[in-house]
Amino acid sequence: MHKNITKLLAGIACLCAFGVAAPSFADAPVKTEAATTTAVAVPAVTPVPDTAPAAAAPAPAAAVPAATPVANKGDTSFMMISTLLVILMTIPGLALFYGGLVRSKNMLSVLMQVFMVFALVIVLWCIYGYSVAFTEKTAFFGGFDRLFLNGIWDPAKGTFAAAATFSKGVVIPEFVFVAFQGTFAAITCALIVGAFAERAKFSAVLAFVVLWFTFAYLPAAHMVWFWTGPDLITNAATSASEALKAGWIWQKGALDFAGGTVVHINAAVAGLVGAILIGKRVGYGRESMAPHSLTMTMIGASLLWVGWFGFNAGSSLEAGDVAALAFVNTLLATAAATLSWVFGEWISKGKPSMLGGASGAVAGLVAITPAAGFVGPMGGLVIGLLAGVVCLWGVNGLKRLIGADDSLDVFGVHGVGGILGALLTGVFAAPQLGGQGIFDYVTNKMSADPYSIGHQVWVQAQAVGTTIIWSAVVSVIAYKLVDIVIGLRVPEEEEREGLDITSHGEQAYHG
């Protein structure tokens, strides 16, 4: 065990060493939806004083740069609260949701995995993750301008860098954006552990997360969300040139408001691959593996629902109308999915269950995530209603078809719900169906071009397919490497005794 941990730490050290040695590829900070630069200043003209002598020739107007936009304290406060809510989603929300679903002998192991994955990813995010995801380099990977968060604080000038939002001339402190996006990376990696719960080595989980975060999550975040921000777009030519600097999926025009592809599909595919490669739990299909505490699961699901308002509304990056739209969609779609799952289960199985209610809520949250700021409330309602019944099939019919032991139905809920939500975003973002359509930053208003539902759904499908393939390939390679070096699975006797005692020397419950 000590050798395994030593190898894990050595691997992390190598990654850090690589980051330190990597060259910087640009001197200027970038803006993203993500943006990471101060907004472009617009020149102002100094007026000629009225007291100038009438006979004197008028002096030429002197152009001076306008003041750099300053972050609004309301937007900043909103984003800090949203960040805290996403942290709440993971610790304790996701940890308790997952913990209640496993057997009591594995409760602490799940809590420990979620807690430690969150901490590990936050550290990696601040060392190199943020820079790779949200600075300009290629369409698939960013550069190293922000390695170790370098360049955000300028000690010589005594100033902090700002990050652009989706509105021209509106910024937030870049450190706030770093923290907000870091919580997205952390919860995405934590979601994966539910697929192979109760049988994976703790050291293997951490090693896999390092590899998958680096080579799957960061490229996905860059491809889907990175752009140089709205302030550099002034005409058709700059719109085209700035688009070429954006992530590959962003360039295609895919809509993903808060992470249907980057977070849910990405994590679900990694989880499913893990469930297949690690194998089924000992006794799966023959012994009872019922959740040990649906009370804990209900508490976790409730915390997820509350925290998700920060996840979705916060993705607007401003405390404005779009945040309000994302907020109401998160409320309505989740409620609708809860109802459709429970009533679907009631009809098909004869009884409504608390587990069904909690699962339906999460399914609705997942499905509305990519659509939250793009669709109208009635579009959100339909997405939620469909998510409940489709994900109910995902954890029953589809799971049997695949045949994998996805312990906590990560793919059935997050994969199926994420795919459904991403595709339906292309449908219900249409203005004719109450959606927001496409924003034109050249005219700084909604595009006058007709919205094609068929075209947008095809673009959404390309984003979904790219994410599935990328995550699957990286996951297979990462699992195989970890299995060779550490081994993915605990011995059978340790699995039967429970990971709480055998892996951590603790018990969730006594007596």
Image (cartoon, rainbow, N blue to C red):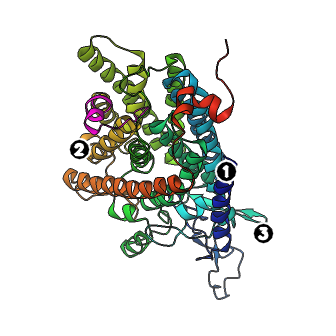
Residue 213 at x, y percent in the picture: 53, 54
Q: Nearer the viewer, residue 425 or 304?
A: 304
Q: Amino acid under label 3?
A: Lys
> How far from the left and from the top, in percent, is residue 247?
43, 65
Packing grade of label 2 (10 A; few <14, some 14-19, many >=20) is few
Q: Which mark is residue 5?
A: 1
The region drawn magenta spans 393-409
For disc 3, the marked residue is: 157
Q: Is mark 3 on a helix, strand or loop?
A: loop
Circles 3 and 1 in contact, beta carbons < 8 Å: no
Q: How far apart are marks 2 and 1 (CA)?
A: 56 Å
Is 319 situated above or below 362?
A: below
List the residue tagged with mark 2: 432
Marks 2 and 1, the one that precedes in the sequence = 1
SS state under label 2: helix
Residue count near mark 1 (Cα–Cα under 10 Å), binned few <14, some 14–19, many ≥20: some
Residue at (49% x, 60% y) in the render: 215
The quadrant of the rendering that contains the C terminus is top right
Residue 162 appearing in the image: yes
- Amino acid residing under circle 1: Ile
